[in-house]
Image: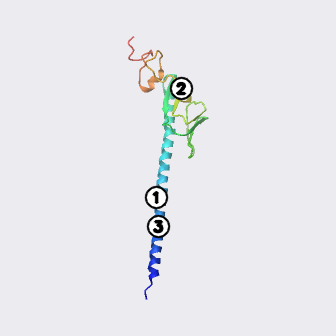
Amino acid sequence: MRRKGVSVTVESVLFIGGLIASMLFFASFYNLAMYQIGNVLTTSERELAGELKSKISMVSLSAPDNVEYLFDTSARTYKLTVDKRKLSIKYPTRDAVSVLISENIKDVDIEDASKICIIKTDDMIELKDGTCASICNINDEVCDKGCRLFDVCDPKCRDCESRDN
């Protein structure tokens, strides 16, 4: 006696088992890929906070009393807050990344700015949304001390090495 229904049942069970195994494999691969993407984004977000902290320190340590530095945030979506020397950057779908700032810095809230101007006036650091007013323009009639941060000598400054007079 032959059983024709048994081979159809076995083939159906094997097909369904293979389909379930394939779905589990792709689900695992998807989760692994999303985990790796999340790690890359988290690393990138921490680097932005660390780089901004570094630039704030650079401006703070600069010799001139009035300095401006333009920091490019690469047009990310974020909310930056400085509160009592704690710089926090919050992204829409992630936890905030925070770093402590040792310099005297004014409290501020900035959201989604493509550029942040870091301004040093006397011993106080201030962050502003947008471009800096007098970052380094050697073609005007004003001595821009911020040019020193870029190793540029503004001929209008008295201590400029390339001054002819």
Q: Looking at the image, which residue is at 54% across and 34% down?
A: 113
Give residue 131's position: percent from left, percent from top: 51, 28
Give residue 133's position: percent from left, percent from top: 52, 23
User: How far is the residue under mark 2 from the one under mark 3?
Assistant: 63 Å
User: How far is the residue under mark 1 from the one under mark 3?
Assistant: 15 Å
Q: Are marks 2 and 1 in contact (CB under 8 Å)?
A: no
User: How far is the residue under mark 2 from the one under mark 1?
Assistant: 49 Å
Q: Quadrant of the C terminus?
A: top left
Q: Amino acid at mark 3?
A: Leu
Q: Which residue is mark 1?
A: 29
Q: Residue furthest top?
A: 165
**Quick one: label 2 or label 3, which is nearer the N terminus?**
3
Q: Looking at the image, which residue is at 55% across and 36% down?
A: 112
Q: Are marks 2 and 3 in contact (CB under 8 Å)?
A: no
**Quick one: label 2 or label 1, which is nearer the N terminus?**
1
Q: Looking at the image, which residue is at 41% across and 23% down?
A: 152
Within-10-Å neighbours for mark 1: few <14, some 14–19, many 20+: few
Q: Which residue is mark 3?
A: 19
Give residue 111's position: percent from left, percent from top: 57, 36
Front disc: 2 or 3: 3
Mark sitting on residue 120:
2
Callout 3: SS: helix
Within-10-Å neighbours for mark 3: few <14, some 14–19, many 20+: few
Q: Are marks 1 and 3 in contact (CB under 8 Å)?
A: no
Q: Amino acid at mark 2?
A: Lys
Within-10-Å neighbours for mark 2: few <14, some 14–19, many 20+: many
Front disc: 1 or 3: 3
Up/down of 54 relative to 68, above or below: below
